[in-house]
Image (spheres, rainbow, N blue to C red):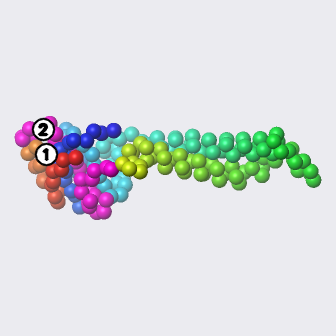
């Protein structure tokens, strides 16, 4: 988790194509990007930033498998060991009749497990206050943020001019 108490210099962009172009130029200029914020997922942003693919789908598989095994195991135990009712040609172990409940518990465990995992990994949840740079980032603006805590005035000027030259509509500094 990132520590707070940072000076953040950020530029707001009006369009995702401007943002992607600015990120490419920042990588070529060897500028260290603190973070990028967008109001919606931008195709091609993850590889451009060098981010790995999320492993959330693997966690979803594990949670779903847990739901499947829980449902199938409980129904097998209940119908075969705990309360076997064998009459009228009913099979001793009626596995096909377990499919609807098994499916529903698989989906339930996967959904709840993935939501809890996502919120935990992202540092979100009840009572947690995450600082925001600008409220418009969640609406219609795109943002590139740089941590300027230990930079001198020449490096700050370089980042300011970079943001201005790459089409940032606004440039701001915020202490978080």
Q: Which mark is residue 150?
A: none
The reply to whether the magenta stretch includes residue 112 is no
| Count of numbered circles on the image | 2
**Quadrant in which residue 123 is drawn:** top left
Q: Nearer the viewer, residue 50 or 74?
A: 74
Question: Which residue is drawn at the image coordinates 13% and 45% (left, top)?
Answer: 159
Q: Please identify the quadrant where the N terminus is shown.
A: top left
Q: Determine whether the residue tagged by mark 2 lies in a helix, strand or loop.
A: loop
Does any portion of residue 30 appear in the rendered image? yes
Q: Determine whether the residue tagged by mark 1 lies in a helix, strand or loop.
A: helix
| Mark 1 surroundings: few (<14), some (14-19) or many (≥20) residues within 10 A | many
The residue tagged 2 is: 151
The reply, left or right, for residue 166 in relation to residue 52 is left
Q: Position of residue 85 (x, y in %)?
A: 87, 48
Question: Which residue is drawn at the image coordinates 30% and 43% (left, top)?
Answer: 49
The reply, left or right, for residue 74 in relation to residue 125 is right
Magenta span: 129-155
| Mark 2 surroundings: few (<14), some (14-19) or many (≥20) residues within 10 A | few
Q: Which mark is residue 159?
A: 1
Cβ atoms at labels 2 and 1 below 8 Å apart: yes
Taking the view exactly as shown, the residue that stands out farthest to the left is 154
Taking the view exactly as shown, the residue that stands out farthest to the front is 127
Question: Which residue is drawn at the image coordinates 28% and 50% (left, top)?
Answer: 131
Q: Earlier in the sequence, mark 2 or mark 1?
A: 2
The reply to whether the magenta stretch includes residue 139 is yes
Taking the view exactly as shown, the residue that stands out farthest to the bottom is 140
Q: Nearer the viewer, mark 2 or mark 1?
A: 2
Q: Position of residue 171 (x, y in %)?
A: 15, 55
Q: Position of residue 96 (x, y in %)?
A: 78, 50
The reply, left or right, for residue 59 in relation to residue 85 is left
């Amino acid at each position: 988790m990132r520590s707070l108490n940072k000076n953040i210099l950020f530029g707001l962009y009006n369009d995702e194509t401007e943002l992607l172009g600015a990120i490419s130029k920042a990588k070529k200029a060897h500028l260290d990007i603190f973070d990028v914020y967008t109001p919606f997922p931008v195709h091609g942003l993850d590889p451009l930033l060098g981010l790995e693919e999320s492993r959330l789908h693997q966690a979803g598989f594990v949670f779903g498998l847990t739901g499947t095994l829980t449902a199938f195991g409980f129904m097998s135990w209940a119908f075969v060991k705990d309360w076997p009712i064998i009459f009228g040609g009913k099979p001793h172990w009626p596995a096909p009749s377990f499919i609807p409940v098994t499916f529903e518990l698989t989906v339930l465990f996967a959904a709840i497990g993935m939501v809890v995992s996502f919120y935990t990994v992202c540092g979100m949840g009840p009572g947690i206050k995450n600082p925001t740079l600008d409220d418009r980032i969640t609406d219609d603006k795109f943002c590139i943020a740089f941590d300027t805590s230990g930079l001198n005035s020449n490096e700050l000027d370089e980042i300011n001019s970079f943001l201005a030259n790459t089409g940032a509509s606004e440039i701001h500094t915020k202490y978080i």
